Image: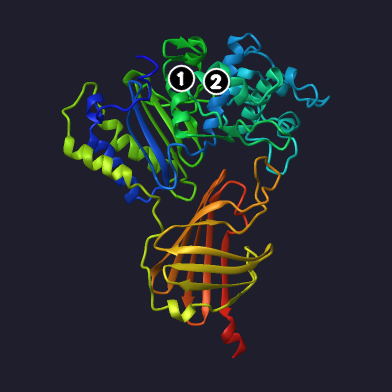
Amino acid sequence: MSKQELFSSANSPEALGIPSSAVLNFIERINKEQICMHGFLLLREGQIVAEGYWDPYSEGSMHRMYSISKSFVSLAIGLMVDEGKINLDDQVIKFFEDKVPQDIHPYLVQSTIRDLLMMSTPHTNTTYTKDDSDWAATFFNKKPSHPPGTIFSYDTSATVILNTIVERVSGMPFLEYMRERLLDPIGFSKDSWCIKTPEGTSWGGSGVLCTLRDMARLAYVTMNNGCWDDTQLISQEYIKAATSKQIDNSLIGESGYGYQIWIEENGGFSFRGMGSQFAFCFPEKDFVFACISDTQGSSLGDKSVKDAFYQEIFSKLSDSPLPNDVETNAMLNEKIKNLRILPQRGELTSSYEQKVNEQWYVLNENPMGIRRMRLIFEQDECIWEYENASGHHRLKVGMGKKTPQVFPDEGYFGEKIGTPSGRGYDCLASAAWVEDHKLDMLVYITDHYLGTLKISFSFKQNEISICMKKGAEWFLEEYMGFAGGISALSMES
C-alpha cells in the first residue's frame, strides 16, 4: 500500500468488513449512556473506515493524551536502542549522577531501563506528587519496597525517568528527538507538544497533546512492526518485544504488559490514557480503534467505552468484505456530521426557578469554602454567582444546552506543572432541573487539562443543600463536598 493510500477514506465500512450498523450502534450507545467522548477513528488495512468528532472537537484539535504518552516514550526508547545510544539492560542510575544520593538503596541501583519499561520498578507506586519540585529525583530518593524486575506496579515516575534519559542523551525534548526519525515520516502534527515537569523536562508519563489522527498514526506504525509505507522507521525487534507480554499483571485483571504498552486479548495490544484515551490494535485483523474522551467524571470510566467498542464494533468484524448497506451508511454519515457533546439532561424550567432566582444563600462552613451564592436565570441561561477563598466568581451556564465559558479560577497549572497558567481553563457548562426542586449543573473542562465538575443544588423552603463532585487530576480540588445554607432574605426577616 503506497503512502498516498495510507489514512485515506474507505469507500464504505462494509468494503473492509465492518457493518455501518455496528458503527452507528456504537455512536448511539455512546450518546445514550452520555459518555463524554470527543472523537473516534476506525482504521483497517491502513484506511479510515469511519471517523467522527463531538463538537467542539475536530480533526485538528490538540487533545491531551494522558498515559498514551507513555507508549510514545517507549517508541523513543526504541529509537535510541536502534541507534546504539542506550541498552535496555543499562542501569538507570548511570544517567542521573546529579540526582542519586550517596546512600542509594540497592534495589534502585539494580533497576534497568527494561525494568522501567515493564512497569516493574522497586516502588509501590508513583514516587512524586504535584508539590515536588524535581520528579526524577524522587525516584532515587524514595525508599523502595521490593526488588526491581519482579512484579508489575503501575508507576508513572518510571516513564518520567525513561523520557528524561531520552532527553539527557539526545539533548532535546523527546518529541523533538522523535520527529525526524519517526514522527515526520508518518505525518504527525508539527504543533504537537508536551506539558513539562517542574524540573523542566517533558512529562512523558502524561503530558503529550496531539490530534486523534496523530495517535492513530503511531498506533498503526506500531501495529505494522515499525514499518510505514515500506520504510522501517523503528526496528521490528524492538516493536515485537514492546507489544508482547513481558510481565504478568493478571493480579489487577489484565492480560499482560509489554514496554509501556498494554496487552489485550484476541492477539491485540493497546495504548491507554486516563479518561478513556485509547488505541486498540489488532495486527491479525489489521484493525485499529482509536478514541479521545473524558470519562473522569463517570462512575464506570474506561469500562463504558471499552464495553461499547468490544460489544458493538469488535464483535461484528468480518474477515472479508460485506454487502454494501447504502441506507445505513447514509444514516451513519449524517449522525457523524451532527455529533455534539451532550448537555446536562433534565427539564429546562421548574416552579422553583422564580422562587430562587437572584436569591443570595449564605452557606454554613463547608469543604469548598463557599461563603455565599446565588443563581440568576436569564432566558435559556443561568449564572452561578458565588464567593470563595479566591474571590467573587460568575459562571454562565446553558439551560439544557452547552455554553462555552472560561472557568473562573485562574490558579491552575499551565504548560508546566507547578506553574499557574494565569488564566481560567476553557469549559462547557450546562444545567437542567432533574427534580422540581433540584438543579444539576455539569461543567466539562476542555483545555490542556480535562475534567468534569458536577453540582447539585437542592432547595427546601428557604434552605439550600449543595453537593459537588469533580473528576480531574490536580485541579477543582476546592469543588468537592457538601454544603447547606439559608436564604439571606429569611435571615433578615
Q: Which mark is residue 75?
A: 2
382 vs 299: above or below: below
Q: Residue at x 61, y 50 (%)?
A: 475
Question: Foreground: 489 or 119?
Answer: 489
Badge 1 or badge 2: first in the primary sequence: 2
Residue at mark 1: 222
SS of the residue under disc 2: helix
Contact flag, marks 1 and 2 (Cβ < 8 Å):
yes
Snapshot quadrant of residue 408: bottom right
In percent of width and height, residue 87 lies at: 64, 11
Residue pushed farthest bottom?
493
388 vs 65: above or below: below
Residue pushed farthest right?
102
Question: Which amino acid, by three-letter code, is at mark 1?
Answer: Thr
Q: Residues within 10 Å of mark 2 (few under 14, many from 20)?
A: many
Q: Residue at x 49, y 24 (%)?
A: 257
Q: Is residue 387 visible?
A: yes
Specify whether 344 is left or right of 237: left
In percent of width and height, residue 92 lies at: 69, 20
Snapshot quadrant of residue 156: top right
42 vs 61: above or below: above
64 vs 423: above or below: above
Q: Is residue 118 visible?
A: no
